[in-house]
Image (spheres, coloured by chain):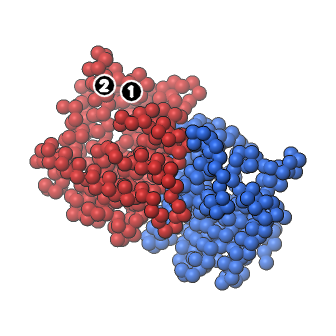
Chain colours: A red, B blue
């Protein structure tokens, strides 16, 4: 069993290597087939993608690859590609027409620090660069493996995954309809929305680790199941923390998510019901790793320390 | 020599097949690895990508592949992927924070017909789907070919290509600087900006046709050179048409590009100089095809009828 100290040390070590990888991917150096990399635009990408975050998605990818005996060098680049997709999604979500957020992680959001047009383009640039990185030879010598990762990344992050989830979330909150009324989503609709908006990329992280490591279909399916359950549990844990933090700070039991008409499972199942569901999903995730030995202990620790944060 | 009638017939036939391919790619059918495709979001993608345009980029790709003896089925999907990138770029360029255009091709732009958040997401979704399509087996049975196309698409459309060109264009027009003053770009800077903003995707169209057809390096390089010169000539032809149309309509010699501080080669070289440069580039493009016989006649016709439109 991995204790919290060992987990945090490993999380930090992977984050450092992801930072280095992103720094290299986001340099001014022009690649074959490119013409020039505009300085101000690259500054915007670097502002958003460097210097922050736990790098949870790359960590899950790198540790899943390691659990399957894969090389770390390839997993780091694949992980950095995933992180670029995550970062672009934050930049576009923060835009005035979307969540209209001025601050993120204690700093002005990109469209505040630069401008809105640059934020749109920087997001587009990060998404495009993610596919470039995922296609690069260092990820895996076999093009068949890389093309599978490229296709998987597209499915997880596109209209049937993350982008689609964000679109459904806007509809659920009534933010893109003429009357502006939030929709009353049922429990299953909320689960699907969350599986798309935040779950798809987390689940792809663990699956991609297995693919990059050339793992068996059985191990790939097990890690995908782990990632799916972890992602769902993670989202509920987030919603619980939001409610509890607000209750503590404001002396009331509804969080800002509820104020904004945001559909969460806490709202549908109640706080106790949501905690029980989070714990059930954590057990499902743990069971998915039954075929792995100590080589998956970091993944088990990731589950414990990210999903059960509020304990 | 292909006459205009034969060229237009072939252009229309390819456009019809691209429309069918896009229609299939943008259907509600959920692919493996996707969860669901939200109806309203897919409606937005279909609104932008279907029902219009000459489909010049796919045409160049399909005809370049044909000139190298490639299969049309794969080239059509690769061409549709390219068209999705082109369509996403128009949607994001039309946004209020960018060019702020209300109309395109006689219809409301996507953010007017739907809403701004949906337009941002639809653009993101189209870009992502382009990589999905380019990675799909139908493009070419060999994953090494597909990964090369994926990487090439990323380079042509990313920070060192189309996205970077759009960022430079914003800077040149002073639209993302605090003082809002246009930059005075020199001739070489304008050429580079245009090579990125519009040239990169056109040049990749012809190169990708060669790659998808499994052509020799020599043929690939020739088609890339053709596409680069065609793209540069095409942009000058566009700028000339803009000036001449305005001169005819308004009785003055400056177009809206000039009003907006847009840097064009017409502004730097004068109308006669720009026409001479357009014709020089057209000759360079034609010479790049010297190693091809009648199998490249449609490409020669594309050069003639798109670049020399104003004659």
Where is residue B197 drawn, in percent x and y?
Answer: 61, 57
> Are the residues flagged by discs 2 and 1 from a single subunit?
yes
Q: Decide if residue B49 is on the left or right side of residue A106.
A: right
A118 is higher (above) or lower (below) than A62: above
Write down the residue under mark 2.
A243
Secondary structure of the residue carrying tag 1 is helix
Q: What's the residue at 62%, 41% (across, down)?
A: B180
Q: What's the residue at 53%, 45% (across, down)?
A: A118
Where is residue A43 drawn, in percent x and y?
Answer: 46, 49
Chain for numbered disc 2: A
Write down the residue under mark 1.
A257
- Residue in the foreground of this view, choosing between B308 and B46: B308
Where is residue B265 drawn, in percent x and y?
Answer: 72, 59
Task: Answer with the quarter of the image where residue A252 lies.
Answer: top left
Crowding near pointer 1: few (<14 within 10 Å), some, many (20+)? some
Q: The C terminus of chain B is located in which quarter?
A: bottom right
Q: Is residue B81 visible?
A: no
Q: The N terminus of chain B is located in which quarter?
A: bottom right
Q: Are marks 2 and 1 in contact (CB under 8 Å)?
A: yes
- Residue in the foreground of this view, choosing between A45 and B144: A45
Q: Is residue B140 visible?
A: yes
């Amino acid at each position: 069993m991995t204790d919290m100290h060992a987990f945090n040390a490993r999380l930090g070590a992977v984050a450092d290597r992801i930072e280095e990888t992103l720094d290299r991917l986001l340099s001014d150096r022009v690649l074959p087939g490119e013409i020039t990399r505009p300085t101000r635009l690259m500054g915007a990408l670097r502002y958003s993608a460097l210097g922050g975050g736990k790098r949870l998605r790359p960590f899950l990818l790198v540790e899943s690859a390691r659990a399957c005996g894969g090389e770390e060098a390839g997993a780091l680049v694949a992980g950095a590609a995933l992180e670029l997709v995550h970062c672009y999604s934050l930049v576009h979500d923060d835009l005035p027409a979307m969540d209209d957020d001025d601050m993120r992680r204690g700093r002005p959001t990109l469209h505040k620090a630069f401008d809105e047009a640059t934020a749109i383009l920087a997001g587009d640039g990060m998404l495009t660069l993610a596919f470039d990185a995922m296609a690069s030879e260092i990820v895996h010598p076999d093009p068949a493996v890389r093309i599978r990762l490229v296709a998987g990344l597209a499915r997880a992050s596109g209209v049937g995954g993350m982008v689609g989830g964000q679109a459904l979330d806007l509809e659920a909150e009534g933010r893109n309809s003429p009357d502006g009324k939030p929709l009353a989503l049922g429990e299953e609709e909320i689960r699907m929305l969350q599986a798309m908006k935040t779950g798809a990329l987390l689940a792809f992280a663990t699956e991609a680790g297995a693919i990059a490591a050339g793992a068996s279909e059985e191990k790939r399916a097990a890690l995908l199941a782990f990632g799916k359950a972890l992602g769902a549990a993670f989202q509920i844990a987030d919603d619980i923390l939001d409610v509890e933090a607000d209750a503590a700070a404001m002396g009331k039991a509804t969080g800002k998510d509820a104020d904004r008409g945001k559909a969460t499972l806490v709202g549908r199942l109640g706080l106790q019901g949501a905690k029980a569901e989070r714990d059930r999903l954590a057990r499902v995730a743990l069971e998915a790793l039954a075929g792995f030995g100590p080589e998956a202990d970091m993944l088990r620790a990731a589950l414990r320390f990210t999903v059960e944060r509020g304990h």
